[in-house]
Structure formats: structure tokens, C-alpha cells
Amino acid sequence: MRMNINQAAKAVGVARSTLYRDIQEGKVSVGKDGRGKPYVDVAELERAYGNVTLSDTSETVSNGQTGTPQKDKKRQCATART
């Protein structure tokens, strides 16, 4: 499961600035989604901090995928009808 930086900081009970510092110091590894936004895997948080609380992390994390453009949806519908 992936979390953005805000979610990750809440999940481990540290300030965002602390998480960013730990990232800069190499204590926590991050990835980048399709839009270049950083994310942290829950397993990485468990490795670095131990306990992770997932209850306060209900924000949606983008995976970098976008929806189907409207013109393609119309084409798909037209194709499905034929």
C-alpha cells in the first residue's frame, strides 16, 4: 500500500518535516508516482519506524493514472454498439 507524505507522517506519528529529514538522510526510501509525486510504501514505514497506524489515513493517493478521455469514451461506446 502506498501513502503520500502527509499520510505517511500521520501514520507513524511524526511531523512532515521529520519525515522529509529522514528521507533526505536516507532513513526512509520513497518512490515517485506517474506525476512525479513522492510516495512511501507501508512496508518501508514499518521498517523505519516500527508501528504504523492506518486509521487516520483515508486520503486518496494518486497512482499517476488518469481516466479515459471523453472522446475515447464516446468512441468505445460507438464501437461497442456496432
Image (cartoon, grey):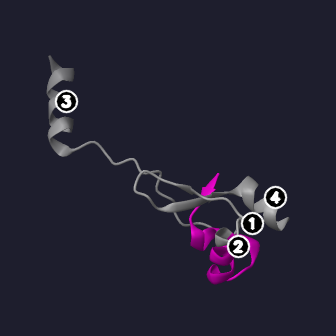
Q: Which residue is mark 1?
A: 27
Residue 14, compared with residue 78, is above or below; it is below
Within 10 Å of disc 3 (Cα), the crowding (few <14, some 14-19, many 20+) is: few
Kindly identify the residue that appears in the image at 47 percent across and 62 percent down.
Answer: 37
Is the residue marked by circle 4 packed among few (<14), some (14-19), or many (20+) residues within 10 Å? few
Q: Which residues are magenta?
A: 1-22
Residue 67 at x, y percent in the picture: 32, 46
Mark 1–mark 2 contact, CB under 8 Å?
A: yes
Q: Of the residues tagged 1 and 3, which is closer to the observer?
A: 1
Name the amino acid, label 4: Arg
Per the model, the C-alpha gap separating discs 2 and 4 is 13 Å
Instruction: State yes or no: residue 32 in magenta.
Output: no
* Alpha-carbon span between mark 4 and mark 1: 10 Å
Q: Secondary structure under badge 3?
A: helix
Amino acid type of the residue that numbered disc 1 sits on in the rendered structure? Lys
Q: Amino acid at mark 2?
A: Asp
The correct choice, above or below, for 55 with respect to 21 in the image is above
Tag of residue 22? 2
N-terminal of the two: label 4 or label 1? 1
Displayed quadrant of residue 48: bottom right
For the residue labelled by badge 2, is the local secondary structure a helix, a strand or a loop?
helix
From the viewer's perspective, tell me whether residue 41 is left or right of residue 43: left
Residue depicted at 19% across the width and 36% down the height? 72
**Badge 1: few (under 14), some or many (20 or more) residues near its Cα, within 10 Å?**
some
